[in-house]
Image (tube, rainbow, N blue to C red):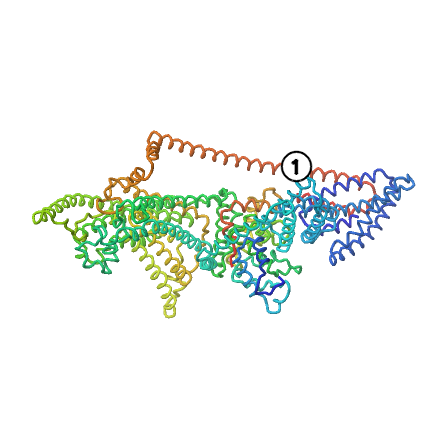
Amino acid sequence: MGTTASQLRKDLLSEYQELTFLTKQEIILAHKRFSELLSKEDRNLPTPRVPMEKVLSLPELKSNPFRKRICHVFSTSDMKDGSLTFEDFLDLLSAFSDSATLEIKSHYAFRIFDFDDDGTLDGGDLEKLVNCLTGETDDTRLTTEEMRQLISNILEESDIDKDGTVNLSEFQHVISRSPDFVSSFKIVL
Amino acid sequence: MYFQRNFRWQEIPLHLYPVLYFFFVFTADEEDTVIDSDGRQERAKDKERKKERDRKRRRNVARRASSARKEGKELEDRPEREERRGRKKRDKEGKGKGKGGEDERQEEVKNDTVAKIQKNFSNENTRKLEQKEMEVVGEEDGDTEGKRKNGRSKKDEKKEDKEKHESSEEEEDEEEKEGEEKPDVLSPEELEKLKEEVDERKKLISTLRGKPWPMRKKLLTLRESHEFVEKYEGALGKGKSRKLTVICYRDFENFKTACVPWEMKIKEIESHFGSSVASYFIFLRWMYGINMILFGLTFGLVMVPEALMGRPYGSMPRKTVPRADEANAMDFAVLWDFGGYAQYSVLFYGYYNSQRAIGWLKFRMPLSYFLVGVGTVAYSYMVVIRTMARNANEDGGGDNNSFNFSWKMFTSWDYLIGNPETADNKFASITTSFKEAILEEQESRKDDNIHLTRFLRVLANFLVLCCLAGSGYLIYFVVRRSQKFALEGLESHSWWERNEVNMVMSLLGMFCPMLFDVISALENYHPRIALQWQLGRIFALFLGNLYTFIIALMDEINLKREEEEVLKLNMTIWEASLYNGTLGANSTAPPITVHPADIPRGPCWETMVGQEFVRLIVSDTMTTYITLLIGDFLRAVLVRFLNYCWCWDLEAGFPSYSEFDVSGNVLGLIFNQGMIWMGAFYAPCLPALNVLRLHVSMYLQCWAVMCCNVPQERVFKASGSNNFYMAMLLVILFLSTLPAIYTIVTIPPSFDCGPFSGKSRMFDVIQETLESDFPAWFGKVFSYASNPGLVLPFLLLMVLAIYYLQSTSKSYKQANLELKKKLQTQNEENKKKTKMAAQKAAMDLEEAQNARSESPRQQRNNNASQQSYRGEKNTVAFI
């Protein structure tokens, strides 16, 4: 944004409205929250970036086990450091908004779960995913035997072409039938 | 060359292996044919030369790879491509030179193969990436597709930063094309094409938000498309009206979202407690909305017209407090019971006058009253059923349990959770659900003591039935007793005796669920099933209580009607005596005016029913609030502060803080609504009261949840049970409108109160309106239409239509299933085919390798070829 950090240009605002699933109020709120995250010296930059650590300190993301992945997926930074511009931030909120379509939600969910960014969910990705879901403490962790069983079950169910990995279309196939996904894949500021 | 292959190996992502494999098979064959056609000695020389060249190339490649990492691929591949082209040219020239040039040509061929390999690699790579992107992006508009073909040669240069590059370059391409298409003179075909393109752009604009691109790309595309559309739409003679409507629509949407109340409050709760607790508040808000509309209907069409235009208070008996009650009609205790002045006001049925049209608007009051009563019910049905249908659609057909594990894995995290404590609970619950699922999968649970469990379950159900029967009897008993008290006069009884019915009902509603909870511990069900049982039992309890209450009320109605009959007789005697008394004194005296408060009147059972419901609602609300304050707030305060001086840890130990009971609260809400629907016809104030109650509830419960509840240990998903609650609401709606409609249709209205007084049935008001307000032919048509001869066939037709729709939906479902099966088998077959092909190719390759290894001159290459062979084996495994 070429404008000052506290103000959003009107034409940009309307364009953002057209390009995201957010309403005007939500975009303004997002801008406010984003500006709060920016440090003083960054505000004068043409496209200020908020480092990942600061984004993670948002209460909405603080307890999310996938917070780092979310930042990485939505970041357009060349350094791959997970830092977000305001537009990336809007992308994030749009994908997680109430009115986003199942397609876009499942697409981003897939990219979030694809820990090594290779375009498929393989055993390693699934294992990391399970570890994220069961938390960091030892008493909630699954044993290796349970983990193996779980992953093989999952692959059995959703790996339709039996190539040992879950690809995007398989993932979307599974997700689209889930009753809870759209209602729980939400982050609201 | 092999080394080079191996070098490339590591760079290529795993999923490209299958593609590469075919490529290898292909090139290997080609090489072999080359070998066969040449003499062996030449080949030896060739090999040496080739090896040297390979070494060079390897160095080259390594250098290039490092430079590519620094500068990007474009710089790298361009000179090579140039070189390749040059080589091809020379190749062609070489053909003319004949046998003498054979050796050189051979080299060139080899060289060419290398180049081809590289080219193919990059080609495959890009194609794969493209495919991936295509999958991701979905259908792009047609002209970019075309551009893709144009830019194919360019594509070779793009690898790592594909998306970014492509987007920008494509935009450039598009811009170029735009420049070309400047409309100077347009032929009809061009015009048509342009129109299509504009339409495509428009479609792109409207679907842009659903594309998973980074914002910068979306912005660029949007601006560019907007420009394009604006530029050519004018030329095509279309106005800008559409843009305006889009803006208007968007503003309206913004306005609509701004109007949704309590969004922030609910969001805060969502982040603390997850979506299940929040779903209660969303449900509460939805209820509030419905009640607002019901309130608007009754308030705007019934209460306000009567208050403004109807006869004022005190003008007739039904609008006046009787003389006997006048002394304490304003007492708070009486008003709290909705007696006294409250009873003789617009709040209740009895106050309304049966005058056909009131005020200067000639407002048809009785008709309006009747239609609002019917409209309330109809609107409620419509809303509930529509919501249910929408929820069912969102379920997406619910593919039962085929993805049990995957759903647990991919959709169990609730991204709304922002509270660390809730997150911890969620972690724990997810882990247990995983473990449970694994256990269930491993062994279809063998119950070692099935008889004991069965016995316990039967016992539990028996106990619950006893509870239900007991509570039903208690309510019946209490209502009968209260009738006896009412006959004796309320003044002689204590507060408890006067409010017994409501208190008993509220207390039962409070304690029985706890009892059920204790009993359900006997059954040893899976928690989810246990929850359903619990909900079903509470539902049965509430329903039983409500219906006992209604049956008791019916008894009372019958009593009142008997009373009314007696009174009607007395009235005539009273009037006659009045008439006779005055007649004796002066025959020409003006008609005597008796103050309306002194005129004897009937008991007006409708008002009585309304009062009962209003009292019930009020006491129910009070109990809810008080339990909230005592059960949650006081408990939290005690636990918090007594914990400093107590012998065990109160916060972690026995009393601890309470959890928010979502299902119980939702059930309470549903039953409350049921009572509103039941009583709204006889007490128009009920929706207003309910709006008030829900409003206060919202704030009070939000506050209570945030300050004194802890997140649930078992975090249940909300959406799954959404339609469950809706179905309950529908059942309640049906069951609560049933008695209301029954009374309206079968019991004649009181003779001296309410809008339908003087008619034999309440719905006669329709008949009356038809006769007097509509032209004669309309009445005729209506009477024909309501003829059983016409109604019955119509009903039959509807039933048939329902049957037809049901059977078609069933057949669709069947077809769906079959298609799914077909898809699966086809998928498997395809996989088998590719696998077979791959195996065959591997066999061929092996044979070729064997044939080659026979010759001793190829020994030095063996190492390399084996390496590549191993790599190929890998690919086979991957396939």
**Which one is nearer the viewer's eye here, B780 or A172?**
B780
**Which one is nearer the viewer's eye here, B56 or B356?**
B356
Number of numbered callouts drawn:
1
Tell me residue B191's x, y (percent): 67, 41
Pointer 1 chain: B
Does any portion of residue B855 appear in the rendered image? yes
The furthest residue to the front: B588
The furthest residue to the bottom: B645
Which quarter of the picture shows residue B342? Answer: bottom left
Give the structural element (helix, strand or loop) at label 1.
helix
What residue does disc 1 label?
Answer: B833
Hey, what amino acid is under mark 1? Lys
What crowding class fits label 1: few (fewer than 14 Cα within 10 Å), some (14-19), or many (20 or more)? few
B177 relative position to B84: left or right: left
Tell me residue B868's x, y (percent): 75, 46
Which quarter of the picture shows residue B97? Answer: top right
B461 relative position to B572: left or right: right
Tell me residue B526's x, y (percent): 42, 48
Does any portion of residue B41 appear in the rendered image? no
With respect to residue B37, does B317 lie above or below? below
B680 relative position to B9: left or right: left
**Which one is nearer the viewer's eye here, B681 or B814?**
B681
B101 relative position to B810: left or right: right
Quadrant containing the N terminus of chain A is: bottom right
**Which one is nearer the viewer's eye here, A133 or B862?**
A133
With respect to residue B371, does B598 lie above or below? below
Instruction: Name the residue: 32% across, 56% down.
Output: B621
Which quarter of the picture shows residue B76? Answer: bottom right
